[in-house]
Image: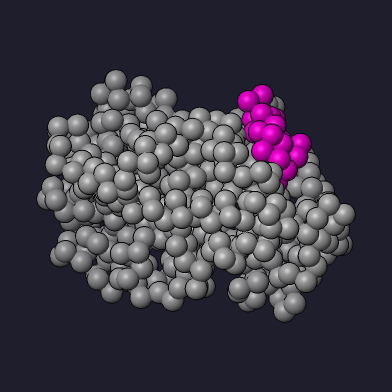
Amino acid sequence: MTACDVIVIGGGHNGLVTAAALAGKGRSVLVLERHATLGGLAVGDEFHPGYTSAGPLHDTSTFASALRAELDLDAVETPPAVFTPQIPDAGPGLLLHRDPGRAAAEIGRQNAVDANRYADYRAFIDRVGGFLTGVLERPPPTPDALRSLLGPAIRLRRLGRIDMLEVLRVAPMCVADWLKEHFESELLSSTLAVPALAGTRSGPWSPGTAANLLRSEALTRSGIRGGAATLIDALARHARDRGVAIRTEATVTRLRTEGGRVVGVTLADGETIDAPIVAASCDPKHTQLELLAPATLAPRLHHRMTKVRASGAMAIVDLALSAPLRFGCRPELDVAHARVVGTIDDMERAFDATKYGRVSAEPILEVVVPTVETPSLAPPGHHVASIMTHFAPYDLDGGWTGDVADTLADTVIARLATFASDLPGSIVARRVRTPVDLETRYGVTGGHIHHVEHALDQLIVRPDPECARYATPVAGLYLCGSGAHPGGGLTGLPGMLAAETILGGS
């Protein structure tokens, strides 16, 4: 193919969503993916013979309902419960279900009053969820289009005066303050706080992190059976069924422009492909600062894009295990998802290390064991654990070396072994992916899995005022990845909304 209507850069979930939507409206679409496989951050890989990791983006419970309906995917009945272990002598840990009825007994073991408060918390989330998803599932409003504000404004007003004011009050808060208003149990508060911080460079006392938690809660539904790999396979099949051409191992090195508009791309081998529209699912800094020729952007926008915050603070430790991961406080549980946290203040201290370019001595760990649901990812009877480690800064003082990465792995394993004492003896192999490794492997600037930091200012206007509605100042060039509204995670929403914008303008 030497020419087409639309080129989509990147075969991750958002790129595939955009491609399928455009092809469904009759456009000829070509997806260019630099790796041999599709899926981007959603796809794990074989890191030791016979053992396949979870991808950095593994939670399918946030995938947009409208897109699920198109793909006809089997849903897991409810989002899986998350287990937060305790040292055996300290307590039984907390197996937290989203449903307050199922969670009541578990929470009651920690604090009897909090079980009722958790039901109130969930009821509030349910009441405001329609408004929040209404904001997240539509393009951000334009300054001069009052009509675009009408839908969210009506939903906000329907909440009633108390809930309406509560949403406006909570969004700029730090998640620590908001959760402490609800709960007495530190274990419950810390468990709930993790999604507000995951993949970000924020601690629980950072302003605006309550908005991250509201966002996560509003988007969470049921998971997809088979996980992220099944989702990516379905998206690729759906795109191909609609006529999308997909090329892997095709690296775009330059966006070609003429007269202030995009005219196509150049690949690493020198091949050129023409298209009047290019949708980039790669991060916006890479798109506009590296793929565009120097001086293409106006100096003001170029400067602002250099200041967009996109420095990651998460590393991943993958473990190949010869036995199930068992926690001493509840050895009977087959745990697919666990969070290792301390108190809220412990979590803040873990974040503090990043301010000084250090790795946290007692990091927050989000542990995913994909082999609980999909045993084929490891040899029979064996398992894989992928441990999302907060906080490990991209800009580490002294830089990331092999020895530093090994020290990080030792720290993570020792911290997890505090709660799972049999873990060290079951480790067959391990791998560390630092933020620099994530940048290299997945092409995300700064190793940031959300492309752009999920801070309140960069969620309201994402990533920049001049390209906050997917179109960039370069005519024909659009953003369709996690660096666009409404942000990162396996939602598919940036891809869907970017496609709607492209179709509306073409």
Question: How many marks overall?
Answer: 0
Image check: 290 left or right of 382? left
User: Is residue 389 visible in the rendered structure shown here?
Assistant: no
Name above or below for residue 225 compared with residue 302.
below
Residue 440 position in % (x across, y down): 54, 44
User: Is residue 259 visible in the rendered structure shown here?
Assistant: yes
Residue for point 44% across, 51% down: 124
In which quadrant of the rendered view does residue 393 lie?
top right
Residue for point 71% across, 36% down: 346
The foreground one among 493 and 150 is 150
**Start and end of the magenta stretch?**
341-366
The foreground one among 125 and 347 is 125
Residue located farthest toward the bottom when viewing the structure as drawn: 380
Residue 201 on the magenta span = no
Residue 63 position in % (x across, y down): 41, 60
Image check: 73 left or right of 324? left
